[in-house]
Image (tube, rainbow, N blue to C red):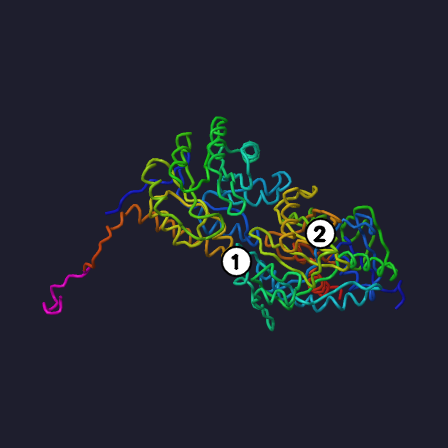
Amino acid sequence: MSQTNKPRVAIVGFGLTGRVAALMLAEQYQLSVFERDLVAAPASVGTLAAAMLAPMAESVICEQDLAEQGLHAMALWPELLAKLDAPVFFQQQGTVIVAHQQDRGDLLSFQRRLKPLAGHQAQNLDGHGIGALEPELAGRFHQGLYLPCEGQLDNLAFYAASLRTLQNRGVRFHEGAEAHIAQGRVNGEAFDWIIDCRGLDAKKDSPGLRGVRGEVARIYAPEVSLQRPVRLMHPRYPLYIAPKPNHEFVIGATEIESQDRGDITVRSTLELLSAAYTVHSGFAEGRVMSLRAGLRPAYKDNRPHISVTDNVIRINGLYRHGFLLAPAVVQHALQQGVL
Amino acid sequence: MMHSDKPLTIYGEQFDSRLLIGSALYPSPEIMQQSLVASQAQIVTVSLRRQNSVSAGDDFWQLIKDTGLRVLPNTAGCHSVKEVVTLAQMCREVFATDWIKLELIGDEYNLQPDPIALLEATEILIKQGFKVLPYCTDDLVVCQRLADLGCEVLMPWGAPIGTGKGLLNPYNLKTIRERLPDHTLIVDAGLGLPSHAVQALELGYDAVLLNSAIAGAGCPVTMASAFNHAVVAGRAAYVAQAMPEKEVAAPSTPTMGMPFWHQN
């Protein structure tokens, strides 16, 4: 089918869910993307994320079905990344969870709250086991867990590659202005389907949607080598250090009930960086690439919501589980109409 | 015979529930709301600091308001007199209440209150018209000094915040109860189990305040209900006056029907 004969789909919002939807639809549909920001300089909260694919660790704070969707999404990611014109770092070598001696109770509590995922087990680690998986952590920690089913990808590489790929596929981009969805049209233009992926920008149309503030540091630390994401037990946040290519590390994330989009606070910076330093002293000589804050879109139940009204499919509320869930949630949403 | 009981009194206001509950660390705001309902608590504590500002955090604040509960703002995360005084003033404005749960942390790791700075801050805030509910250690003299400053409510800890260890020093808590018989005493922090709450109420404490024990439970809503039952049971036991402990067993059923050679 020629490009002009394909059904026309508008994707409104070019954050993580918008990109995943566009990649899933690009071959069969004539796509138009509407984005408030410039697509080459996205402000999407997904650009802050550590992009960890951690269904088992997150099962501690989410329901069983969401953890299972996370496992499903893990299988979908390689297919999605294969559609891209540039390689994106993707890894499935598990997560190591460590705790300082004083926080042993938090580790036990975390372990007790892990939900069973069919065919996947958490493994207890002693100091020797931690050192075997992460040699640079040998001697620093004496208790931990290994969650082999987990993975991660490079969020920034995914954002760059998905834009380039969709540009190469002839997708039309309308950028730099807010788009309005009304009466089954976008800015007055008719489409066969409209996929609303605006996140918090859709607040007016999505009662109950709120922002949950998260703050994240990105550090270049050539003296630190970690093979996989490491989580550190912390009494208030799930703290993690996600190693990206070229000795870059994403350290996050705070979680604050606030709509404040202001810069990261000194307190949060100290908490994140001191936690990283206690995991590996090599972070002391690292370079701070960015300290950022953003708002995760969430509903009251902290679960993703999908709704279909006429030709409009709305996907929102992925909360702290954007990369974990996006392929599964978007696929499920699109199957309700488009796919 | 039923003994009558008086309700919980906080600065002249009376409440039926003896459970005060926190609003942090729940799996979701929805579960928080359900837990608040299940707890039958009438007072919820809210931290302004973690929300940055209520105007910015108005969605979460709206969820709290929707519960209809009385709000007790707290100064969680403050480390100096200046910080708590400023935050208390912000809270008074934002939440339109002169109640303040005064938390002033002296040790970052176990979040132990700083008793010296706490006294200083309490004095300043009472002079400014606040009704202070100080979170303090279970030290009799600190509690007496806080009472001397005009606190009608005192909130000694059971154990460090979030540890769930229960009442680490019942003797201290009992002494404070005996020495300050007319003050409203609330065990704040360190509880993990409903039985800990029962114990606090059995000691004569007027109420308990907790957060992690419910929010961190596998099923927060069910645990909230369990704590509600616990404070009711503990208070009833206190009002009913427990039997005195004895060192030797005493039969609770008459032994007249038993042959005498079986009795010793």
Chain under label 2? Answer: A
Q: Residue furthest left?
A: B260
Chain under label 1? Answer: A
- The kind of residue on which mark 2 rests is Gly
Towards the viewer: B139 or A307: B139
Please tell me whether residue A55 belongs to the stretch shown in magenta. no
- Assign the N terminus of chain A to one quadrant of the image: bottom right
Residue occupying image coordinates x 79% and y 58% = A157
Residue occupying image coordinates x 50% and y 59% = B218
- The kind of residue on which mark 1 rests is Arg
Q: Quadrant of residue A316?
A: bottom right
* Whether residue A298 can be seen here: no
Helix, strand or loop at disc 2? helix
Decide whether the magenta segment is chiefly helix, strand or loop: loop
Picture coordinates of residue A121 (x, y %)?
A: 58, 70
Please tell me whether residue B255 belongs to the stretch shown in magenta. yes
Towards the viewer: B159 or B69: B159
Q: Residue B82: give its label.
A: none
Badge 2 local density, few (<14 within 10 Å), some, or many (20+)?
many
Left or right of residue A9: residue B170: left
Picture coordinates of residue A15 (x, y %)?
A: 75, 54
Q: CA distance from mark 1 to mark 2?
A: 37 Å
Towards the viewer: A288 or B214: A288
Q: Mark 1 sits on what residue?
A: A104
Helix, strand or loop at disc 1? helix
Instruction: Select label 1 or label 2 by which is in front.
Output: 1
Towards the viewer: B259 or A65: B259
Q: Which residues are magenta?
A: B251-264
Q: Residue A199: give its label.
A: 2
Q: Residue furthest front?
A: A139
Picture coordinates of residue A20 (x, y %)?
A: 76, 61
Left or right of residue A145: residue B152: left
